[in-house]
Amino acid sequence: GTATRDGVVGRNERFLAVANAPSAHSASRGGFRSGRGTLRQNRWPASERFGTSVVGDMASSNKPMEIGTVGALTLSVASSVSIVIVNKYLISTLGYRYVTFLTALHMLVTVGALRVAARSGWLEPKSIDRGALLRFSILNGVSIGFLNLSLGFNSVGFYQMTKLAIIPCTVAIQTIFYAKQFSARVKGWLCVLLGGVAVATVTDLELNTIGSVMSICAVVTTCVSQIWTNTMQKTYGVSSTQLLHAASPYMALTLGFISVPLDGFLVGGSPLYYEYSAPVVFVAALTCAIAVAVNFSTFLVIGKCDAVTYQVLGHLKTMLVLMFGFVALNNPVAGKNILGIAIALAGMVAYGVAENADKKAAEQKGGGSVLPVTGNAGANGGAK
């Protein structure tokens, strides 16, 4: 195990830190420092945000949307799980821990890839209000920073609970600011899902004031940035790729600005003076290539759904990564892990069925919009 405040973190908890570390549109972030500034434990990040209901969209009568949604979901899950595995090797085996800086590189490569696509005629750029793009990009970068700080100041178990808190917070924000209604059965199955994930992943719940504040800030900024991704596509009439093309330069600049001081605080040293070996460069370049697929799929998927449903998809990725650790890496498995995975998967399927039923009912009443967009959302890129 790796040394922590409590002594030792087992292989399961370390591997879970990969699947549940700070997440945004790019593929990796992480924290390594305690409140006193001492290197305590290694935790690895993965990318997971935004998504849609597999059951709900597969049941749709619009066949082109079915194919597009299923393809986006498949790409999102496959690329996210793949980058978790590669990141784990880069950070745990090769010892490269400047993951916020790596996230900035991921977004920079995405900027380049989208520019090439635009010049090749595969993408038609569309103008979006610069002020809204700046707010959107800065909020995403800030959310990554808070997630990293939450992971750095809290135990693994408390950080898992922080991730679980994103769904109820998103439900509350959408209900209050966007007039989105969630039925009792949807809320009930979300509770079942979160309970299963908690049983499978949460260990200790060590609390501290600074860590709690960082977690609250991380949850709120993450929820709002997810919702804004959806509202901006609807408000400005752009595709997911057009939004990513427009926002990615600002996102890369924001991440580049915060990555060096943040990684220096959490890890020590600087990524600018790190002695890069050939294996580190090769694996880091591989993560950048995968990150393009991660970024593309997350923006593609968010255009077809809402933030709550993608969080459900994110927990599915967590379960897949956990099962990968059991099967491929021979990580020790406990009865509560199997029970939690089973409960979570059952909750995901039931949530998909319930959400699809609610969507059909809303369409029959003439109100089939997944996420209502208000005038304020259009002016500011999200809720006020």
Image (spheres, rainbow, N blue to C red):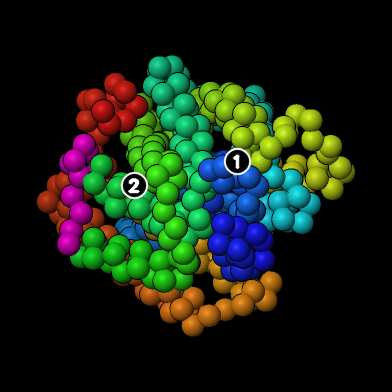
The amino acid sitting under disc 1 is: Gly
The amino acid sitting under disc 2 is: Asp
The residue segment tinted magenta is 174-184
Give residue 269's position: percent from left, percent from top.
Answer: 72, 34
Mark 1 crowd level (few <14, some 14–19, many ≥20, 10 Å Cα): some
Give residue 160's position: percent from left, percent from top.
Answer: 45, 57
Residue drawn at (43%, 42%), measured in percent from left and top? 210
Q: Quadrant of residue 188?
A: bottom left
Q: Is residue 257 above or below residue 177?
A: above
Q: Which residue is mark 2?
A: 306
Residue drawn at (63%, 52%), measured in percent from left and top? 40
Asked whether residue 5 is drawn in magenta, I would say: no
The answer to whether residue 141 is seen in the rendering is: yes
Give residue 304's position: percent from left, percent from top.
Answer: 38, 46
The answer to whether residue 121 is seen in the rendering is: no
Sequence-first tag of 1 and 2: 1
Q: Quadrant of residue 275?
A: top right
